[in-house]
Image: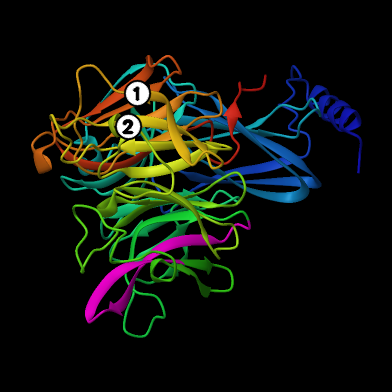
């Protein structure tokens, strides 16, 4: 191969020999081509970069009024296919590609995005403040014309995954894949560009598991744990309880890990809403720091910890007869979502269903002391004025110590006060960012704040 400097000198000599003023074209080095293609998602594009030698490559993209983002493919290859996410509607984007550190001019391309689909444009999010992380992942159970996952940046929709049925839980695998619990389709696994790559169908007579419902979470081994109905006859009564199943999308193997009937007593472990057809109503599972599984059982008003080997229930609290005592004022009612963000600290979104003295919703954090058999409140967030969300909602601790909180019910639905509100709250209970959803959204399930989708970072366009 002729060295780059020699190629440029030869080009100048040829142009000068024609009697014209020599003007050298940009030297793109070993980047020979950049093409941009559409994907199933209107908020993601696929960029293919071709090189004359195997090398890493950096792709940078942005438009007027958007952040400039960049992502680097570190592997050495002559062809790179890179997905670029977080695109806004109705914009003209520029894209560049260059080999890091080689000093050559970047090759450029561009594309235009379409206007927002009408169902998304009607959602109408209003934001205030600045979140610690740029992206909000918002799970939409129901609304006018849309249900599914929204990715929101600075109040603008920059990604979405629509659903066939209601969305009851979302998680992300270590490789960035989105896993959605679709009430109609079962568990669906998507790449970021909207391609469906795995599916565990909703239960039928032929499946070993029963109806999949109300949550899925990624395991430490990157498989998936989900809640399914379970049934048993207890003293002549057919009771519907809960079971936990593990699914490996790559092998499609499904394994039963736990059943409430093996560890909890139908005759005593109940709440005010427990009935034979819906004993516990499990609505949230997360892994704790030890590999234990935290589970929210809404109808019984209990939170439980299942041992990492799934062979015992370590503790229970809430409800009428937990193994850990809590103060009466700290009782949670009809709760949604539970997690253990640090050892022994349990975070609960307390909906406050049928709360004596008037309903309101809050976030409450407990310190669990198994030796003393107590769960003691150490932190609470309750907005002013109160918001009552009869159903749904979440509280997730962020890496910086703040908490992402969602009050997800529209005013008037199941007696909820509204408005639908998501917030980032600091440890002092002050919000630093919040959003409100318009009347076209009726119910949001959960909220999370994340720094990126596939490792993209803020950048700047390289010099020509």
Residue marked by disc 1: 381
Residue marked by disc 2: 330
**How far from the left and from the top, in percent, is residue 59?**
63, 35
**How far from the left and from the top, in percent, is residue 136?**
41, 33
**How far from the left and from the top, in percent, is residue 60?**
60, 31
Magenta stretch: includes residue 235: yes
Callout 1: SS: strand
Taking depth in this image into account, of 99 and 370 the one nearest to the observer is 370
**Residue 307 lies in quadrant:** bottom right
Q: Is 280 on the left-hand or right-hand side of 224?
A: left
Taking depth in this image into account, of 17 and 313 the one nearest to the observer is 313
Secondary structure character of the magenta stretch overall: strand
Q: Which of marks 1 and 2 is in front?
A: 2
Q: Is 396 on the left-hand or right-hand side of 283?
A: right
Q: Is 298 on the left-hand or right-hand side of 50?
A: left
Q: Residue furthest front?
A: 372
Residue at 34% across, 23% down: 381
> Where are the magenta residues, as a range?
221-244
Q: Which of marks 1 and 2 is nearer the N terminus?
A: 2
The answer to whether residue 175 is seen in the rendering is yes
């Amino acid at each position: 191969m002729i060295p780059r400097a020699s190629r440029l000198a030869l080009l100048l000599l040829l142009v000068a020999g024609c009697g014209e003023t020599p003007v050298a074209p940009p030297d793109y080095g070993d980047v020979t081509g950049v093409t941009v293609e559409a994907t199933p998602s209107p908020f993601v594009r696929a960029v293919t970069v071709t090189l004359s030698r195997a090398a890493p490559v950096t792709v940078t993209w942005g438009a007027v009024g958007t952040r400039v983002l960049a992502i680097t493919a570190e592997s050495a290859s002559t062809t790179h296919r890179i997905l670029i996410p977080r695109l806004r509607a109705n914009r003209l984007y520029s894209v560049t590609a260059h080999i890091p550190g080689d000093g050559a001019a970047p090759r450029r391309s561009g594309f235009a995005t379409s206007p927002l689909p009408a169902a998304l444009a009607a959602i109408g999010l209003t934001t205030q403040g600045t979140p610690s992380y740029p992206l909000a992942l918002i799970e939409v159970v129901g609304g006018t014309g849309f249900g599914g996952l929204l990715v929101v940046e600075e109040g603008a929709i920059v990604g979405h995954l629509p659903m066939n049925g209601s969305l009851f839980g979302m998680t992300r695998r270590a490789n960035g894949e989105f896993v959605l619990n679709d009430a109609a389709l079962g568990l669906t696994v998507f790449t970021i560009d909207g391609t469906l790559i795995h599916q565990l169908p909703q239960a039928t007579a032929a499946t070993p598991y029963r109806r999949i419902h109300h949550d899925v979470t990624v395991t430490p081994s990157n498989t998936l744990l989900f809640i399914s109905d379970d049934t048993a006859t207890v003293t002549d009564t057919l009771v519907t309880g809960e079971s936990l199943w593990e699914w490996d999308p790559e092998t499609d193997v499904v394994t039963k890990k736990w059943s409430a009937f093996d560890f909890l007593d139908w005759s005593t472990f109940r709440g005010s809403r427990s009935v034979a057809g819906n004993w516990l109503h499990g609505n949230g599972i997360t892994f704790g720091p030890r590999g234990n599984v935290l589970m929210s059982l809404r109808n019984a008003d209990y939170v439980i910890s299942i041992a990492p080997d799934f062979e015992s229930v370590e503790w229970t609290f809430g409800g009428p007869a937990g193994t850990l005592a809590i103060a009466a004022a700290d009782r949670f009612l009809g709760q949604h979502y539970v997690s253990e963000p640090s050892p022994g600290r349990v975070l609960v979104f307390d909906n406050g269903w049928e709360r004596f003295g008037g309903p309101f919703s809050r976030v409450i954090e407990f310190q669990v002391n198994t030796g003393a058999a107590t769960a003691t409140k150490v932190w609470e967030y309750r907005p002013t004025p109160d918001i009552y969300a009869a159903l749904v909602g979440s509280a997730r601790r962020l890496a910086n110590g703040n908490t992402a909180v969602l009050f997800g019910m529209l005013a008037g639905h199941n007696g909820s006060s509204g408005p639908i509100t998501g917030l980032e709250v600091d440890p002092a209970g002050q919000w630093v960012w919040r959003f409100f959803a318009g009347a076209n959204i009726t119910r949001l399930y959960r909220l999370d704040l994340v720094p990126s989708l596939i490792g993209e970072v803020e950048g700047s366009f390289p010099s020509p």
